[in-house]
Image (tube, rainbow, N blue to C red):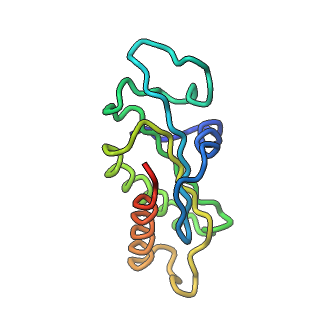
Amino acid sequence: MHRLKTRAQFQAAMAGGVVSRTAHFALHRLVLPVTEPGSLPDAQGPQALFGVAGSAGDLGGVWMGAMAPKRWARRAVTRNAIKRQVYALAAELAPGQPPAAFVVRLRLAFDRKQYPSAWSEPLRLAVRAELQQLWARAKP
């Protein structure tokens, strides 16, 4: 699994469309074409920003990005912990995914009255459970 690094990669992955939503997260996916090793795609498109996998079983074709905007997670501790949860779960699920670029986007804040600590065990468990639900809802 590779991580998305540039703004253009994030924008291309998000342009692929939303495949799953939960109360707090949205999962975007851009399917990358599978080509034979050493060959080029028919047309140049957004997939040119990513290393295209050689075969469907090649993990080199799975790209992952996480977005936790300040608007929805004010504290840096919370933003970084949410991103760590996203990448940890994605690493577990990457072997079963087709070659694609994924972005998990935080789209709503967690209630600070229910989770007053910046990163508590109940918040960690809630984020993990919702991320698992997000991936389970995603259509292959």
Rendering coords of residue 127 (x, y %)? 45, 69
Q: Residue furthest right?
A: 71
Image label count: 0
Residue at (39% x, 51% y) in the render: 90
The residue at the far bottom in this view is 113
Quadrant (top left/top right/bottom left/bottom right) for the N terminus: top left
Query: Residue 67 location, x and y as percent?
Result: 58, 54
Along the viewing direction, whichever of 78 and 53 lies nearer the viewer: 53
Residue 68 in percent (x, y) is at 58, 59
Nearer the observer, 135 or 65 = 135
Q: Is residue 15 left or right of residue 130?
A: right
Residue 123 or residue 117, whichever sits in front: 123
The answer to whether residue 44 is above or below residue 96 is above
The location of residue 95, given as percent across then percent down, is 31, 43
Q: Residue at x 38, y 16 (%)?
A: 37
Q: Residue at x 55, y 72 (%)?
A: 23
Q: Nearer the viewer, residue 49 or 99?
A: 99
For the point 50% across and 38% down, the residue is 31
Report which quarter residue 123 is drawn in.
bottom left
Displayed quadrant of residue 24 = bottom right
In the image as oriented, which residue stretches furthest toward the front? 139
The vertical placement of 20 against 53, above or below, is: below
Apparent side of residue 110 relative to residue 135 in the rendered image (left or right): right
